[in-house]
Image (cartoon, helix red, strand yellow):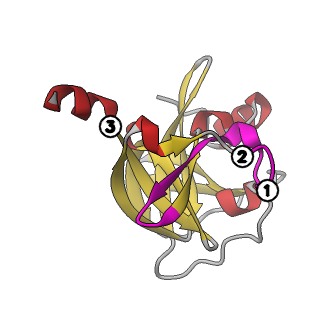
Amino acid sequence: MAIETAAELSQYLTFKLDEEFFTVKVHNVREILEYVKITKMPDSPPFMRGIINVRGSVIPVIDLRQKFGMAGTVPKTSTRIIVLEVERETGSLVIGALADSVKEVIELPPDQIEPPPDMGTRWKKEYITGVGKYNDEFIMVLDINKVFSHTELTLMESGSGGEAS
């Protein structure tokens, strides 16, 4: 029984944007970085803040707050860059995503994740795979692979020098 229970649990990284908690599956997370200077890219969409160098690799950095229609991130000491692998048809793309703060890795069994509500959320329903509850807080469970369109991913890849893994 313990083996079945462990297999049913999924690990998620929780983070905050504004006053909202979000989470992504840990298997999409490569690492978490302290905020560093981001080099702006000309003619990029507003949510694409620019690029950073991570151990010799150029990584595009996006502002999830702007992508979700919030005011842009104002860097603070708690601001982090979550380095993620986003799956796409031609392989994965490594991107950095700004978060106001990163909280912790949690485990959520599937029965603690409800489908996203049909109304009352300000985010596109296709971005959210569900709503979990942890420590009396609601957490939006993101499907990071659906947050960006094919065009946006192509633009990010070209802005990072085409480095994909």
Identified by mark 2, the residue type is: Pro
Q: Which mark is residue 5?
A: none
How many labels were placed on the picture? 3
Q: Quadrant of the N terminus?
A: top left
The answer to whether marks 1 and 2 mark residues whose Cβ atoms lie closer than 8 Å is yes
**Residue found at the far right of this picture:** 43
Q: Which residues are magenta?
A: 117-137
Q: Secondary structure at mark 2?
A: loop
Labels 2 and 3: the sequence-earlier one: 3
The answer to whether marks 2 and 3 mark residues whose Cβ atoms lie closer than 8 Å is no
Labels 1 and 3: the sequence-earlier one: 3
| Rendered residue at 48%/56% (across/down) | 133
| Rendered residue at 67%/43% (across/down) | 116
* Structural crowding at the residue carrying mark 1, measured as other residues with C-alpha within 10 Å and reported as few (<14), some (14–19) or many (≥20): few
Query: Which numbered disc, 2 or 3, marks the residue closer to the eye?
Result: 2
Identified by mark 3, the residue type is: Leu
x and y percentages locating residue 88 in the rendered image: 61, 24
Nearer the observer, 137 or 83: 137
Q: Which mark is residue 9?
A: 3
Q: Which mark is residue 117?
A: 2
Is residue 106 shown in magenta? no
* Structural crowding at the residue carrying mark 2, measured as other residues with C-alpha within 10 Å and reported as few (<14), some (14–19) or many (≥20): few
Identified by mark 1, the residue type is: Gly
Indicate whether 38 appears above or below 12: below
Q: Which mark is residue 120?
A: 1
CA distance separating discs 2 and 3: 22 Å
Inspect this view and state whether residue 93 appears.
Answer: yes
The answer to whether marks 1 and 3 mark residues whose Cβ atoms lie closer than 8 Å is no
CA distance separating discs 1 and 3: 28 Å
x and y percentages locating residue 44 in the rendered image: 80, 51
Residue 108, image quadrant: top left
